Image (cartoon, rainbow, N blue to C red):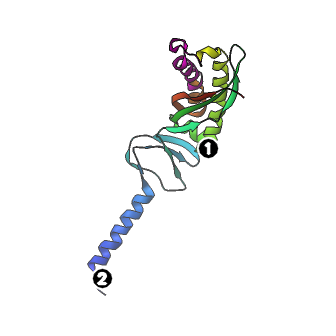
Amino acid sequence: MKRNPVTLVTAGLIAVIFAAMLFAFQVRQTEVVAVTTLGKYSRTVDQPGFKLRLPWPIQNVYRFDNRIHNFEKKYEQTTTADGRIMIIQTFIGWRIKDARIFLERFGGDVARAEQSLEGLLRDAKNSTVGRHPLSDFISPDREELRFDDIEKEMLAAIKPKAAETYGIEIALLGIKQIGLPE
């Protein structure tokens, strides 16, 4: 029985593609990948390109988006150093710094990571705003405003905790809006 050469080439090509899918994976420029071997962390891959691996279930590949994620906190009341109540809305831009810590802490779940960041942001905001009078936030004199300093203080308070505890790098932090209670 004669075999068609086109059929043999096609079958060989399919076998090569299947083997490549089992033993290789691709990392995109926007990704960071954590690889586990038998359920335990083995390595982080943050350089784009094709990488080798052992087939599932021996090794699992967890992909994380390494671009900056935006997280906005809803309006919250806080008290200034001079006892005034104000309402502030803040935001942070974050990305995954350490894929191992992020995977172990959150299982790769961005929503759980943002819930944890919410608590850190609230603590940093309340402690920082509590050290400044209302005139640092709202003033007719532009020279009295200290927005940049306040945002830098909040960033300095949250950045090391997020990196060490959650494997997250806080790229930016800012005050989006300020309001006064009715």
Q: Going from the N terminus, do you reach mark 2 or mark 1 first?
A: 2
Mark 1 Cα shell of 10 Å, populated few (<14), some (14-19), many (≥20):
few
The residue under the point 58% across, 36% down is 72
Quadrant (top left/top right/bottom left/bottom right) for the C terminus? top right
At which x and y percent is residue 134? Answer: 64, 16
Residue that badge 1 annotates = 111
* Tag 1: amino acid: Ala
The residue under the point 34% across, 69% down is 12
* Secondary structure category for the residue under label 2: loop
At which x and y percent is residue 180? Answer: 67, 26
User: Does the image show residue 105?
Assistant: no
At which x and y percent is residue 26? Answer: 41, 51
The residue under the point 52% across, 39% down is 69
Q: Which corner quadrant of the image does residue 129 belong to?
A: top right
Does 30 appear above or below 178? below
Residues 50 and 19: in front is 50
At which x and y percent is residue 15? Answer: 38, 67
In the rendered view, does 42 fall on the left or right side of 109? Answer: left
Specify the principal SS of the magenta part. Answer: helix
Please state the extent of the stretch shown in magenta in the rendering: 137-159
* Tag 2: amino acid: Arg
Q: Which mark is residue 3?
A: 2
Quadrant (top left/top right/bottom left/bottom right) for the N terminus? bottom left
